[in-house]
């Protein structure tokens, strides 16, 4: 059965993807920020394995993974986790930039680096859940958009570098998707949150599964998903 390593499996798009893959019997490895969160994820997806590593501290990921049992092969590495903190450029400190760049860009790059041997062996797939902000930036979205623009560059470079190893790379760019992150964004924007206005996480999960399930003769490079309401 295919083996998937998923970040952000605790809520939103990541939870929907993990549930769908779990229901069809695939093997799951779920990344958690700490041991307590790992227990929660294991209870949510019985039979899944967990890894502990803090995306906010990518310099420690190599050490953290070195203390744990790792998967022997990875058929797909799904980078779904992300953080957002809105603010105007003139008001943002380096701490606000590091918070988003670490979790949204540097940690995915480091996890990918550490997992490349398993991905190459399986001729696997790396999928980055990016954002519409990875294609265009708006006021107060500077650090988040910068991290997502960087994530696009990471995916594009990786695709060229790993093509000869049979590793496929996909970027998915969802528009506003219902979930805890969207509720937080609305709070920061001072707007009322209505989940029914936005994409259901399960709809994004459908596009992700389509990309990773394609036969070997095809590869989705970039996939944009927008609210249909």
Image (spheres, rainbow, N blue to C red):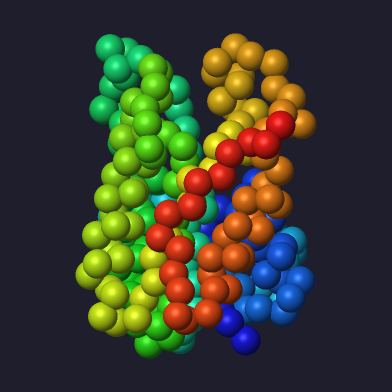
Q: Position of residue 174 (x, y in %)?
A: 54, 43
Question: Residue lying farthest front?
Answer: 217
Give the side of residue 38 with respect to residue 133, left or right. right
Q: Is residue 34 at all visible to an observer of this figure?
A: no
Q: Position of residue 155 (x, y in %)?
A: 33, 57
Give the side of residue 133 with respect to residue 157, left or right. right
Q: Quadrant of the N terminus?
A: bottom right
- Seen in the picture, residue 137 relative to 67 is either above or below; the reply is above
Give the side of residue 172 with respect to residue 108, left or right. right
Q: Position of residue 44 (x, y in %)?
A: 74, 61
Q: Quadrant of the C terminus?
A: top right
Q: Position of residue 123 (x, y in %)?
A: 40, 83
Q: Which residue is rendered at x = 40% and y = 60% of the image?
A: 221
Q: Which residue is rendered at x = 69% and y = 16% of the image?
A: 192
Q: Quadrant of residue 114?
A: bottom left
Q: Quadrant of residue 142?
A: top left
- Seen in the picture, residue 213 relative to 225 is either above or below; the reply is below
Q: Which residue is rendered at x = 31% and y = 35% of the image?
A: 146
Marks counted in the figure total 0
Q: Is residue 115 at all visible to an observer of this figure?
A: yes
- Seen in the picture, residue 185 relative to 206 is either above or below; the reply is above
Q: Which residue is rendered at x = 33% and y = 49% of the image?
A: 152
Give the side of residue 187 with respect to residue 125, left or right. right
- Say which of 178 and 181 sits in front: 178
- Seen in the picture, residue 68 relative to 37 is either above or below; the reply is below
């Amino acid at each position: 059965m295919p083996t998937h390593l998923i970040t952000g499996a605790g809520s939103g798009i990541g939870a929907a993807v993990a549930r769908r893959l779990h229901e069809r019997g695939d093997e799951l490895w779920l990344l958690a920020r700490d041991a307590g969160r790992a227990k929660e994820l294991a209870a949510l997806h019985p039979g899944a394995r967990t890894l502990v590593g803090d995306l906010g501290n990518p310099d420690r990921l190599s050490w953290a993974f070195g203390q744990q049992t790792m998967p022997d092969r990875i058929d797909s590495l799904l980078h779904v986790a992300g953080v957002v903190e809105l603010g105007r450029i003139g008001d943002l400190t380096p701490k606000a930039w590091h918070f988003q760049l670490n979790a949204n860009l540097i940690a995915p790059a480091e996890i990918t680096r550490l997992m490349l041997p398993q991905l190459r062996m399986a001729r696997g797939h790396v999928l980055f859940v990016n954002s519409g902000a990875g294609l265009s930036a708006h006021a107060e979205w500077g650090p988040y958009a910068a991290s997502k623009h960087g994530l696009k560059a990471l995916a594009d470079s990786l695709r060229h570098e790993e093509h000869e190893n049979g590793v496929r790379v996909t970027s998915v760019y969802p528009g506003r998707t219902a979930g805890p992150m969207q509720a937080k964004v609305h709070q920061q924007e001072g707007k009322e949150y209505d989940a029914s206005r936005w994409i259901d996480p399960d709809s994004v999960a459908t596009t992700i599964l389509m990309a990773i399930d394609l036969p070997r003769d095809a590869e989705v490079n970039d996939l944009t998903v927008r609210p249909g309401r």
